[in-house]
Every structure is written in structure tokens, then in C-alpha cells.
Amino acid sequence: MDRTVNHGATESALQLLERIEEELLKTPNWKEFSTMFSIFAMESIERRPTSALLTNTMRSLLKFAVDKYAEGQDIETFKKGFYEKIEEVKVATVRSVEKLSDIGARWLPDGSRILTHSYSTSVLKIIEKGNRLGKIKEVFVTESRPGGEGVYTAELLSSLGIKTNLIVDSAVNYFMGEIDFVLVGAEAITAHGALVNKVGTSQIALSAYKRRTRLIVASGTYKFSFESMLGDRIKVPFLDASSLEIPRDLLKLDNFAVSVPLMDVTPPEFIDAIITEIGITSPEGVPILLWEVYGGWIGSQPDIKDLINKLRNIS
Amino acid sequence: MISNNVLQIADDIKTMKIRGAGAIAIAAAEAMKQAALTYNGEKDSFVEYIREVGKLLLRTRPTAVSLPNAVFYILKRIDSSSEDPVRATISIADEFISNVKNAQLKIAKYGSKLISDDMVIMTHCHSSAAVSVLIEAWKEGKRFKVINTETRPKFQGRVTASILTKEGIPVTHIPDSSIRYHMSNVDLVIVGADTVTSDGHLVNKIGTSILALAADEADVEFYSACESIKFSPASFAGGHIIIEERSAEEVLGEHKDLLDKRGMFVRNPAFDFTPPEQITGFITEYGILPPRASLLLIKYVFGLSSGEMQMRLLEEEP
């Protein structure tokens, strides 16, 4: 399976930035740089269209390149600046995770019994810091099929000596009565406050809502996506049958098909709070924080497709 | 003395040589019948004797639901029969066995009426009763699609997918985590049952309750196809249904070395509870029952006092 599937959105984005540094900074002129970067940007967004962090990062890097070219900057000077820009984004991303996990760990109640799903850098950091403060009683982790990243999460948490209970995805409703709150990461948070995350999140949220158990999302503001306010719909990627390791004798039967969505959408009414690096907000607070992050109305942000087209036209 | 063939059946139930609710119920009834056929004591003490046989059978698998139902189905009717108790036992046991064998056919007939063309029907795990409903509807010429879950950890959904596709029914197989995602396209849910309580809770394969909750949220009808032997008179008498938690290896598979980590545990419950308010009906061989009317079926088939008798027995000496 593609590694991007198995990793959290934050980790994947950081890996991608490293690849950009490795490959793009070797290009000798603007033409080659712009051709390669436009393909690179398109492909990475297509591979993980739901990741707002990826989209937001790409937008800022594309804008940087388009602006510098327009200013008439020579390629060598540009590449130096571009490198610095990437480093800046990387540092900012890591710093955001640190800040939001400080806030999250501070928020954690004593004796926390937490349910988490899939793999999230931010969630792991919060629990790790919370554990250092002696606040964690136990953590329930779903397998998170397809992909099974939950097994990895359970491995990491149990290695820290945290009492970790691995459960199958279908058992979330069974255990909802044994936990204090649900803590999940984010692939993206729309301007409407809906959460896009690994498939299974929305039924955990439904179960939590039904039992009046709180659902908390750990997400840097860099995962806020304003595209929904511009009419873009969320396209959930689907995996093929190999993601479920279906036995061959079943797979070859007529009339047999699989449907394996990678993400699902949790409505804002199931979300109690979002822990960001700026602070803790409600889903309804997202547009306010978007204003804060972008310094004004989001409509003034450039469209990523326009930026890619502009870059392509550089020759 | 209790005859050897009765003891043999009891032992086969105890050692799990006989498995599955239907098979256990039939075996228990057969044991009662054999006990009557081989009885050579005083006529007056037969009723006491057959009760002892019943107790012996009950102790083989104290938490099974279909086994006491077989026993009490027979005991209840011996009491009210005008026939000679020995002959009554034999004919009632035969009647019970034939009812159990025919139950699924009736369930399929009633259940298939709920299905119409172009429906999308979701099911979970593998239930022969639920499958029989789907196959009956398909054979009646109705054309629908089925979405079925993998059902971790043991993938019983693969069995269901294989059976249905071989009948020609189109099946879309999904991971358990995507139940809510897919529910918006579903018209009807049909699952099986492990046990039904007197207040209308459904105990069934882990994941059933999140399926019911997602169906409820999406305003989709949720049915459980369920023979009468799955209804628990003991729950009427305050008996608890204990959810078995199974081994870590079932979940971990190739990752079982993770258990070496000091904080690592696996919680692997086999069943969960679905509340009656999320269930549209139980499709039984006696008809489609509103969930909160479960007690009516228990009264009709096994008698209201059967649960009390069972619980007292369990509370007696081991």
C-alpha cells in the first residue's frame, strides 16, 4: 500500500517537503523547475486530495514561486529563497504540533480514558505529553481498517508504557461507555467545521454523540480548508480490493465487488472542540480562525489550480 | 438412571462437539426424547425424572440460550398435555425439532416480503437466517443489491459474500469502519441474532450496534432475522447476558508479538447489545415481532416461568 495512506496527514506533508527539497532544488533553470514543480504539485494533490495541509502548503509554495518569477528573480537566488521558505514551513508545522499538543495536554482531565482512531501525529503528541503529566489512565485504539494504522498507534503508545487496548473498528459502540472522550486527528477541517478524517471517524463520532461522550479533534489551523466555501466538494479517495486482503477465491466470484472509502466526513454537530496551535475552538469557530490565519476574508486567497497553470506557463 | 445415549448427547453438547444454536436445541430435544424412550421406572415418577434430565442438559452449557429453550418448550407442554407424559414428551420433542428445522423457511417467507426491487440491503457477519431471507427474495424474482461488512476479527462477512454471490446476488463488500459512510445508500438492514432479551435488546456479533445506530440516524429500517429459540426467558428472570471477550490473537494475527509490549492489551468482545428503539422488528418463524413485544413470544413459546426455573437451577449447587 502507498505509504501516504498509512501515515498521518502531518507526517506525509513533511515527507513531501523533503522530497521537494531533494528533487526540485537540482533543477538548473526556471523552465525545468516550473515544469517539474507543477507536475509534482498536481500529482501530490491528486494522490491525497483530502489533505488540507498538503493543499495549503502547496498553495503557499506555488504562490511564492509564481511571485518570485514575476519579480524577475534569477533561478539561483530563487532556489535559495525557496529552500528557506520550505524550511520555514517545516519548522512552522512542527512548532504547531508542539504548541497544540501543549494546549491539548494541559486540557486533558486527570485519569483520562481516551478512544482514538487511525494514526495522528498530533493525537500521539497530546497523549505522550499528557502521560508525562500523569493524566492518562488508558487508551483505546481501533485497528482502523483499511490500512490498519491503529495497530501502529497502539504499538507506539504501549511502548511508552501507556495502557493501550487495541479493538476492532466495529467495537467502538461497545466501548463508548468505558471512555471519557474521543480524541482524533484531522485530514482536513472544512470552513463549515466538518471533519474529514480516516474512514470510521464519523461512526465513532455518531456513537460518542449518542452517548454524550465528547469528541475532540487535534488539528493545526494549517489543516483548515476553505475550499468548501468556494463550492468545492470533498472527493473521498477509494482503495481497491487489495486493501482488504480479500482471498482470491472470493475475489474471482461474479457479482462480487468492494467499496473501500479512505476517508469519511464527520458533521460539525458531532464535534465538541478542536484543539489548534492557537487555542481550543468549536467547529463554528473555524471561520474566525481562518480569518486569523489568512489575515482576512478567504476569498482573497489564490486558487491552487490557477497557480499551477501560471507556473506551467513559465518557459 | 439416566440412559447412556442421553448422557452421550449431553457430553457432546458440553464438549462443543455440537455447536450452533439450532443444532444444540435439536440435540437437547433429541436427548429428552431418548430419555422418554428408554424410561423404565415408575409411571408416576416420570415427570420428576424428565425434569432431572432437563437439569442435566441445562448444566452442560449454562449460558446457552437455545438449549434451555428446547428443554422448557418440552417441559411446559408436558405439564399441560392430556396425553401420557412419556408419550407426550416424545411427540412434543418431535414437534419442537420439526419447528426448529422449519423455522428458517418461515423466516425466509416473512422476511422476503420486506424486500422489493432495487433495494440496497446491508447485512453484517454471517447469519443463516438473514441469508435465507435474502435468497428467498432473490428466488422470488426480486432484484436488489447487498452491501456486506467484512466483520472483523474473523471475517465471517466473507462467508456471507460467497454464499450470496453464488446465488447471483450482487454483493459489495465493505470494511466495518465504513458502515456509516455507506448507510446513506441503504434502504434496509437485515442481520441475524445470537440472543434476544425479554425487553427487546438484540445481542449479536460485535458491530451490530453501530450498524443499528447508523441505520437509525439515516432513518433506515433495521431487522433481525431470528428463530424463537434465540429469545431468552432467563433475561425475564433477571439473568444477565455475559459478553464473551475472545483471544488477542484473533485480532492481532501476524502482529501477535506486540503483546510483549508492557502496555499492550487487546479487547475482543464477540457480541454487543442493540437497544430495541433502534430495531424495527424481529423476523421470527411466528411472525415479525415489534422488539418491545419480545416477552409475548417468550410467553407463547416457552412460558413466562421458564426463565425463573432456569435461573433457580443455575443458582443451585454446581
Image: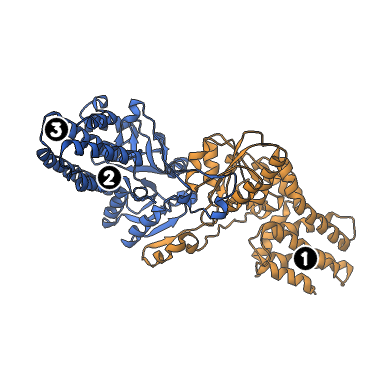
Chain colours: A blue, B orange
Q: Amino acid at mark 1?
A: Ala
Same subunit: marks 2 and 1 = no
Q: Are marks 3 and 1 in contact (CB under 8 Å)?
A: no
The residue that appears at 12% across and 38% down in the rendered structure is A75
Rendered view: B10 above or below B107: below
Query: Viewer-proximal residue, A108 or A217?
Result: A217
Q: Position of residue A58 (x, y in %)?
A: 25, 37
- Whether callout 3 and callout 1 share a subunit is answered no
Subunit of label 3: A
Residue B136, image quadrant: top right
What SS does tag 1 mark?
helix
Q: How many marks?
A: 3
Element class at badge 3 = helix
Query: Quick check: can you spot residue A282?
Result: yes
Q: Is residue B49 left or right of residue A217?
A: right
- Front tag of 3 and 2: 3
**In contact (CB < 8 Å): disc 3 and disc 2:** no
Q: CA distance from mark 3 to mark 2?
A: 23 Å
Res. B31 mark: 1
- The residue singled out by tag 2 in the image is A13
Identity, as a three-letter code, of the amino acid under mark 2: Ala
